[in-house]
Image: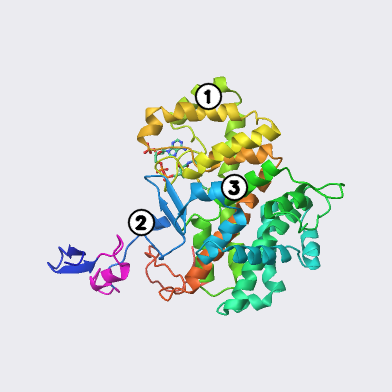
Amino acid sequence: MADTLTITDNRTGKTYEVPIADGTIRATDLRQIRAGADDGGLATYDPAFMNTAACRSRITFIDGERGILEYRGYPIEQLAEKSTYLETAYLVIFGELPTEAQLQQWTREITFHTMLHENIKKLMDGYQYDAHPMGAFLSTVGAFSTFYPDAKKIFDEKSRLKQVHRLIAKVPTIAAYAYRHSIGRPYVYPDNDLSFTGNFLNMLFKMTELKYQPNPVLERALDVLFILHADHEQNCSTSAMRSIGSSHADPYSAMAGAAAALYGPLHGGANEAVLRMLNEIGSVANVPAFIKRVKGGEGRLMGFGHRVYKSYDPRAKIIKQTADQVFEVTGKNPLLEIALELERIALQDDYFVTRKLYPNVDFYSGLIYQAMSFPVDMFPVLFAIPRTSGWIAQWEEMLLDPEQKIARPKQIYTGAKRRDYVALASRK
Ligand code: ACO
């Protein structure tokens, strides 16, 4: 017997059979049920998409109860241990791990596209001297659509691939230029002898030395952090990417919107909030009093809890190991002791245990970035660079999905009933 849901409408006594597939019913199947006298049928109301699947996707699997995250079926733990960011980006976008020849070709293409058009420098020079690097990043990504008008050919596979190469390759350069501009230092051109993350560190931190040599431990740590942030299925910025892309805008315009969504403190800004919280707590001795305040409803333990993960965020576990390696090079971030004590107490406290609140990806990432000399303003940009691969993969999947159309949610109208225009002189 097929899986169906039987709905009885108590108003009419009628029953309806609605098919269940993949743990969902189709919202449009509810239209056959009348909602009122003159309506288009019953609809669902789901602000913030708390319980609505808007697409089918083959990219990322998350099981929040069991703390599982997989890209294209590969566990995040294995990718973080064995893969590189560039290889993972290939996997996320194309669906399979590359062969050796494919990886070589992919790396060559990405390396060849790292330079920015010189006019981009002029554009970035126009930002205020203290421009936030994320604001500069997202508007420069948007400006790319004017530099690459061929990107409009979104149904031309070759053109799409070209934009994929450009986007993955150029986002670190845009990010580094945005950073250098914000601190008044000259831009550093890409060094194609270096790895993806090695070159990024070069463009950020090179001073007067002739050749920048990235520290291999920090280079690898950044690569691991990039792997962890490559995709996270239908989050706020990815939904923005799909939604804008559904109007057939070019990928640069769509990605500017996705990056804008990531700019928000509820999405890309949580690790900054963790650092602020740790600074406010100030010392390990103050941790119990802080936890007491949180339990009393005064603020939240930032970096704890997640909409999807109701157990330890698998990315947080990996980040904690990475933090140890980074601190061996940079020296311990003095805030680490406070973070460890917070975690120790919270994980055995009934308040956090019963609510299934565990450390999320942001609990330790800010501490690592700070130890690596990244200013807090750069944190959302460091998130946007690797998430570019996820945004592109999700955008392309949406474009090629025959079930997808321009995104257009319904609303429940709660405004005024029809009324007649009142002349200005007669208004009170
Ligand atoms: N500290 C203290 N209490 C918390 C926390 C927290 N960090 N998170 C949730 N709670 C409590 C809530 O007060 C609520 O308690 P109640 O049932 O007594 O009212 C309960 O746990 C459930 O919380 P919700 O807000 O309903 O959970 P939701 O899934 O909507 O929120 C969120 C998830 C936003 C991540 C939340 O846990 C939070 O604010 N965490 C801190 C901010 C943070 O770290 N954000 C980064 C998320 S990861 C990312 O975006 C990349």
Task: Give the extent of the magenta segment.
Answer: 20-40
Packing grade of label 1 (10 A; few <14, some 14-19, many >=20) is some
Tag 1 near tag 2, CB within 8 Å: no
Kindly identify which residue carries mark 1: 287
* Ligand 1 within 8 Å of the CB at mark 2: no
Amino acid carrying label 3: it is: Val
At a point 57% along the width and 59% down the height, the residue shown is: 89
Residues at marks 1 and 2, CA–CA distance in whole angstroms: 36 Å
> Residue 247, image x and y in percent?
52, 74
Residue 379, image x and y in percent? 64, 46
Q: Which label sits on residue 224?
A: 3
Determine the residue positioned at 47% across, 61% down: 59
| Residue nearest the observer in this picture, 108 or 233 | 108
> Label 3 to label 2, Cα distance in Å?
31 Å
Of pointers 3 and 2, the one earlier in the residue sequence:
2
Q: Residue furthest left?
A: 13
Q: Where residue 64 sits in the image (x, y, percent)?
A: 40, 47
